[in-house]
Amino acid sequence: MLDLMGIAVRGLLHRKKRSWLTITGILIGITAVVALVSLGESMQLAVRRSFEELGYDVVMILPGELGGGFGGPSSFSTSFELDTESLTEVEGVEEIGLLNFQSVYVKADGNEGFLDALGVSENIFSFFKVEIVAGRGFSPDERGVVILGREVARELDLRAGSTLQIEDHPFKVVGIYSADSRLDEDAIILPLADLQELLGEEGVTMALVRVAPGDDVGQTAKRIENFLYRSRGRRDLSVQTMEEVHEVVQRALGILGAFLGGIAGIALLVGGIGVMNTMYTAVLERTREIGVMKAVGARNSQIALIFLMESGLMGLVGGALGTGIGSFLNFAAVTAAKRALGTRVLEYGISWWLVLGALGFSFLVGAIAGLLPARAAAKLDPVEALRYE
Amino acid sequence: MRDEAIVELLGVWKIYHMGRRGRITVEALRGVDLAVRRGEFLAVMGPSGSGKSTLLHLMGCLDRPTEGKVLFEGTDVSTMRSAALARIRNRRVGFVFQSFNLSPNLTALGNVELPMVFAGVPRRERLARARELLSRVGLRERERHLPAELSGGEQQRVAIARALANFPDLLLADEPTGNLDSETGHGVLSLLSETNVEGVTVVVVTHDPEVATAAKRRLRIRDGHIVEASDA
Ligand SMILES: Nc1ncnc2c1ncn2[C@@H]1O[C@H](COP(=O)(O)OP(=O)(O)O)[C@@H](O)[C@H]1O
Ligand SMILES: [Mg+2]
C-alpha cells in the first residue's frame, strides 16, 4: 500500500508543473470553504456569546413582529405603553426591564448634534452589564444624570463630572461606560423617566422580562402574550424568547453559510473536474507504462490504486494548502473586523473538525475525480497497452 | 513429457479484431502446438509480423488464446481470472522487451523493485534483492539514475534485473538485442545465458544469429505457423 503510494508520488513529481496547476483548482475551492465556514463559525460563536450574556431566561416584548424592529440601540422603533404593574402579576414573570431608544439633540462645550440615547429603567443593569470605566453608574431614583459611551466621551471631550445639555435640559455626566463593540459605545444612557420627560411621552421601545427560576421560558412567554392580547385587545406587540431570536439569527447565518458554501462547492467541483482531466491525460500518457506494470505482475486493483492515490494526493495537497490559506484569511478578516468595530465577542478560531473535514473532503474530491481515470487505467488490455506508442 | 513442460500451447489460435466494429481480423497465430521444457533455452525466429510477440505474450500469460489451450504448468490459462494471471506474471515469469520499457520516473533501483512492490515484498528485503540484482548486471553504482540517464545497453540490463526480481521460472525476451549494437548485445546475451545456466527457462525472440546460436533449441515461425524446429 505504502509502496504503491511511492509510485504514485513519483508519478506526480514527474509532471510537477501540471500537478501544481491542477492542485490550484482544489486549493481555491478548499480555501473558500475553510475561510467561509470558519468565518461563519466565528460569527455564530459571537452571536451565541452575545445571547448568553443576556441570558436565555429573558423574554423580549417588541412592537410588531420579530424581524422588523429588532436591533441594537441604533434602531428606532415605534414606542408603546405597557402596564408593567399588571404584567408583573403574570405567572412566571420575575422582573421587567424597560428600554427606550431615541435620538436626542445634545450640546456640550460648543459641540452639538444628534446622539443615540438609551433610556433605561433602574433595574436594567441586572439584564445586561455595562462596564463603568470612569465615574459611576446611576443609582435608583436618581434623575438628571447620564452616562456616556467611551466613544461619545472621547468625541465630545467629556469626563465624569462634566455637564451637557440634552434637548436643552442640563444633565450631569456621572460615568463613562465601555461595551463589547465600539458601535455600542457611541451612545448615551440616561434614566427612562428623564428620557420620557424630555420627549413628552410615556412609552418604551422594548421591554425585557426575566422569567422566574423554575418557570418554563416558552410557557411564560405564551402567558405574557395572552395577557397582552387580553389587556390590550389587539396583537400589536410580539413576545420573543431569546432562544427564538437566537434561532432566527442562526438561521439567517445558516442561509448565508449555505449560499457561500454553494459557491465554494462549485469551485471544488471545477477543481475536481480539473483533477479528472489531468488524470485522464496521465493515464493516456502512461498507457505503455501501465502495460509494463501489468506485464511485471501488477493486478488491476493495484493499478487503480496507484492512480487513485495520485488524484487523492493532489486533492489532499490542495486541501492542506487551502486549509492553511483559508484559516489565515479568516484570521485576517476577524482581526480586521475587531479593529474596525472594536468588538471583543468576535474571535478567531478554527475547529479541528473543520480542518479534518476539509482535508478528508479534499482527498475525497481528488479520489472521486480520479475514479473513472483509474478504472480506465486498470481495464487497459496489457498487450494493447504495450503496443501503444 | 507433459509434466516436464513449463508452458504448453495446444492448437493455439490468436485472432485480433481491428477497425470499425472489429470487422477486420488478423490471424496472428494459426494453430500452434508447442511445449517449452523446463530449463531449456529456446530461440524463436521469423519475419516481422509473423506472430512471435503474440506467441511470447501467450506464454507469459499476458493474453489468452482465441482458440486452443495454453497450459502454464499444466493449468489452462483460459480458465484463470485476471488476478491469477497477474500473479503468474508477477512470480513465475519475467519479461524483457526490445524497447526496454522501464518506468521513466523511477530510478534503476525503483524499476528493479517494481515487481517486488506488486508482490508485497517488504521494503528492506526488496532493496537488498534489487541491489544484489543491479550488482549482478554491473549497475550497482547507477542505482539512483533514471532510465533517461542510462545508455540502451544499461537500460536493458536494468530490465533483465527487473525480470529476475521475483525469482521467475520462465524468462521471456522479445528481441532483447534488437535496439543494441552488437557489442552491447553481446553483454545482454551473456546475461541471458547465465540466467539459463542457473536453471531459469529462457525463451528469446530474435533476429540476431549470435543469440540464436547461443540457444539450445530454435524454431522458426511464419504467418502464424511454426515452420521449422531444430535442436542445436
Ligand atoms: N493487439 C493487436 N491488435 C491487432 N493486431 C495485432 C495486435 N498485436 C499484433 N497484431 C498483429 O498480429 C500480427 C502478429 O504480430 P506480432 O505477434 O507482433 O508479430 P511479430 O512480433 O512477429 O512481429 C501482426 O500482423 C500484427 O500487426
Ligand atoms: Mg514483435
Image (spheres, coloured by chain):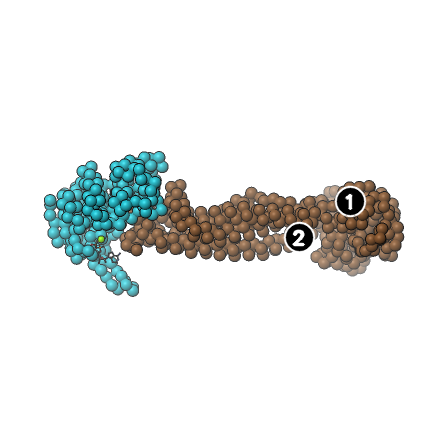
**Gap in angstroms between the C-alphas marked 1 and 2:** 27 Å
Q: Quadrant of ligand 1?
A: bottom left
Q: Secondary structure at mark 1?
A: strand
Percent across and percent down for residue A204 are 81, 54
Q: Quadrant of the C terminus of chain A?
A: bottom left
Query: What chain is the brown one?
Result: A
Percent across and percent down for residue B104 are 34, 47
Mark sitting on residue A249: 2
Mark sitting on residue A177: 1
In the image, what residue occupies the spot 17% across and 43% down? Answer: B41
Percent across and percent down for residue A224 are 77, 52
In the image, what residue occupies the spot 52% across and 50% down? Answer: A30
Mark sitting on residue A191: none
Shade of chain B as shown in the rendered figure: cyan
- Horizontal side of A199 relative to A74 (left or right) equals right
Examine the image and state in which quarter residue A199 appears: bottom right
- Horizontal side of A313 relative to A115 (left or right) equals left
In the image, what residue occupies the spot 83% across and 49% down? Answer: A190
Same subunit, labels 1 and 2: the answer reads yes
Mark 1 / mark 2, whichever is N-terminal? 1
- Horizontal side of B135 relative to B35 (left or right) equals right
Percent across and percent down for residue A66 are 71, 56
Q: What's the amino acid at mark 1?
A: Tyr
Q: Is mark 2 within 8 Å of ligand 1?
A: no
